[in-house]
Image: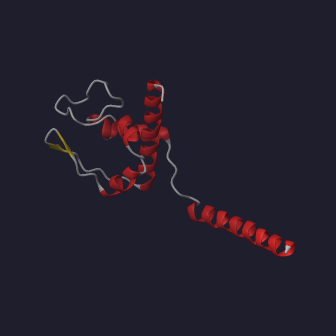
Amino acid sequence: MQKTSLVILLTGVVALGMWGISDYMAHKGEAYGDVERGQSIAEQTCLRCHTKFEGDPLPDPNVTTAPALASFGQRWPLENLEEALAEGITVSHDNMTMPEFSFTSQSIADLLSYMESLTNEANAKAGK
C-alpha cells in the first residue's frame, strides 16, 4: 500500500514538473512589456486625447469623455485590452471616432505595462 502511494505521489510530482517545463517552453520568448517604451507609445498615441489620471488637465479640450489611462486598470483587467489593441479599438468620445492605431504584440505589451504602472500609482495615491 505504501509503495503504491509513493509511486502515485512520485508520478504526480514528475507530471507537475513536466507540465511546468512545457508551460515555460510554450511561453518562452513571449513579449513582456517595458514601461518606458509603453510611456513613449502612450505619449505618441493615447495621451493626445486621454489623461494619465482622473482630474488631470485634458490634452484636447474637444474631447471631454475619454477616460484616464490609469482608470482602465481600476475598472477591469488590462489583459482584456490586449485583443482590442491588436484588432483596433472602435470607440468614440464626444462624437469623435478614435483613430486607428497599429500595434505589434511587443508594443501592446509595452503599452499595457505602462498602463499598469499608472493604475498602480493611482491606487497608491488613493490608498488602495
Of residue 124 and residue 108, the one placed in the foreground of this image is 124
Q: Residue 58, position in %: x, y?
A: 25, 27
Q: Which residue is drawn at 25% across and 50% down?
A: 100
Say which residue appears at 51% left-offset and 54% top-offset: 31
Q: Which of 7 and 27 is in front in this view?
A: 7
Which of the 4 quarters of the picture holds residue 28?
A: bottom right
Pinpoint residue 19: horizontal percent, then vertical percent.
65, 67
Looking at the image, residue 6 lies above or below residue 94: below
Horizontally, residue 71 falls left or right of residue 14, namely left
Percent coordinates x, y for residue 118 in the rendering: 43, 34
Residue farthest toward the left in the current orientation of the protein: 95
Q: In the image, what residue occupies the spot 43% across and 29% down?
A: 122
Instruction: Name above or below for residue 45 compared with residue 24.
Output: above
- Left or right: 90 as drawn, with respect to 34: left
* Between 123 and 117, the one nearer to me in the picture: 123
Q: In which quarter of the image is the N terminus?
A: bottom right
